[in-house]
Amino acid sequence: MKFKQLLLVAGICTFASSAMGQIFAPAEMSRQTKDCLECHQKLNPGLYQQWGSSKHYRGNVGCYECHQADADDIDAFKHEGVTIAILVTPKDCARCHSKEVGEFADSHHAKAGRILGSLDNVLAEVVEGNKGMITQGFPGGVSAAAVNGCWACHGSEVKVLPGGKLDPATYPNSGIGRLNPDGSEGSCNACHTRHDFSVAQARHPDTCGKCHLGPDHPQKEIYESSKHGINFFSKIDEMNLDNEKWIVGEDYWAAPTCATCHMSQTKNQPVTHDVGMRISWNNRPAISIRPEVADAKMGLPGANVPWQVRRDNMKDVCLSCHQTQWVDNFYVQYDGLIDLYNTKFAEPGVELMKLAKPLKSPVPFANKIDFTWFEIWHHEGRRARHGASMMAPDYTHWHGTYEIARNWYSKFIPELRELIDDGLRSGDKNLVDAAKALDTKLEEILHSDNHKWFIGKMDEDEAAARKKAAEEFRGRYKD
C-alpha cells in the first residue's frame, strides 16, 4: 500500500480526529526526496522555488511523498531506482488531506469531467472540431477544440501509455473533474496550483476565473462588476489572504471572495470543499432546479441536504457583514429573477422545443433554432441568473434578460413559426399533426399574461397605467 510506504519514508506521521482531517509531519526530509532534488533543483528551478515557498517544504513533504507509487499502479514507472507516477491525484492527496478530498469527491466540481458525454462536448468534438489531432491514445483522432477547451476546465480522461507516460491529448490537464487512472475524480491543483499550493492563491477570485468566466458562466466578470468585487480589488491589501486562520468578519471584512461565500470558514461553519453546500439554486440547466435534485441525479450525498439548509449556510456567511433584513430582501430579489426566467422563458421554451422535435433535423445543431434556443438558456439565461445571484445588474439585465427577450421574440418565435409553416405544407400527416400541436401550444403561450404584449393584447388597464406612469415621468423631469 502507498500509505504504508509513506509511513516508512516519513518516520513520523501525526493524525488528528476525523473531523480535523489528517496532519502529516515527517521529522525530516526523506532520502528519496533529497535524491530527487539533486537533479530537479537544476533541471526545474522554477518548480523547485515554488515548492521551496510552500508549507509542504516547511513540513518536509517533498517530491517523493506526493509522486511515489506502487509497482502495480497503472501509471507507475521506475525512475532513478524508485517507483513514481507523474500524475498526483486526489487519492494521493487524501493520504494527508482525507477530509478535504472526501468533501471534494461529493461535490459537483469532482464530477465536472462527466461533460465528456454532454451536449457541450458534442459542440467541441463535432460542430466546432474534427478528428485531426491524432495521438497514441486516440489513433482515430480527437478534436483539438475539446482538448484545449472543454477538457482543460472540466477535466479529461487521462490515458496512460506504455511505460507510465501520459497521452498528450489528455495530459497536461488540471481540469477540476479530471478522470484519473486510479479511479479518482478531480484535480486538487485546479485550485491549489502546484508546486507552492498557496492558500492565498486559492482564496483569490482570479483562481476561480480560469474556468468561471465567458459567455455561459461569467462569474468572474460578474464578481468584478459587483460591489463585492469592487471592494475586493480596491482593498486587496486588507484581505489578509495568506493568514492561516481566515474567518470572515474576524480576519478580514473589506469584501468576500468566491472562496468566502462558497467554501471558507465563518464563525459558525468550518471550511468545506463541497461548493454546493451553500447554493440554494442550481442554475446550470435550462430550467433552474434545487441543488438536492441535481445531486440526486448524480448520485451524490447532497441529495439529502435540502436547499433551505444550504441557504441558511450562505446566509450565515452574509450575516458576517450584512443585517438580517438586507440578506432576506436580497433572496426575495434573487428568487424573483429565477421565477421570472423559469416561468416566462425556460419552462415554455423547453415545452416548445419538445413539440418542435419532429419538425427538425434529428442531428443536434443541424438546425438554426438549436443554436438559438441553446444560447437563450445556456448563455443568456445563465448570465441573467448568475448576475442576480451575485448582484451584478448589468449582467442580470443587458447581458441577461434583455438578450433572452430579444432572441426569444426576434429569433426563437419566428423560427418556430417557420417550422410550423413547413410542417403544414409538407403533406406528411405526421408532420402536419406535429405542426398543428406546436402551433396550438405557441398560440397558448403567446396569449398568456407573460407574452400577450407581443401580439398587441396587453390588458387595457395595464396599458393605461403604463401610459400614465410615462407621462408622469416626463412631466417630472421636463425642462
Image (cartoon, helix red, strand yellow):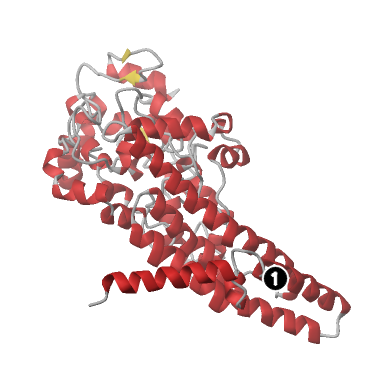
User: Where does the N terminus fall, quadrant-wise?
Assistant: top left
- Left or right of 76? Residue 234 is left
Which is more toward the observer, 326 or 134? 326
Instruction: Give the answer, above or below, for where 355 lies relative to 219.
Output: below
Residue 181, horizontal then vertical, whole percent: 49, 41
Seen at 46% across and 38% down, the residue is: 276
Residue at the right extreme?
429
- Left or right of 303? Residue 30 is left
Instruction: Give the answer, above or below, for where 390 lies relative to 88.
Output: below
Residue 272, horizontal then vertical, whole percent: 38, 30
Residue 119, horizontal then vertical, whole percent: 58, 60
Which is more toward the observer, 64 or 446? 446
Q: Secondary structure at mark 1?
A: helix
Seen at 27% across and 71% down, the residue is: 477
Instruction: Give the answer, above or below, for where 56 lies relative to 435.
Output: above
Which is more toward the observer, 139 or 320? 320
Local crowd at mark 1 within 10 Å, few (<14), some, or many (≥20)?
many
User: Where does the C terminus fall, quadrant-wise?
Assistant: bottom left
Circle 1: residue type: Leu
The residue beneath circle 1 is 442
Seen at 29% across and 36% down, the residue is: 322
Which of the 4 image quadrants contains residue 449? Answer: bottom right
Residue 90, horizontal then vertical, whole percent: 41, 34
Which is more toward the observer, 181 or 346? 346
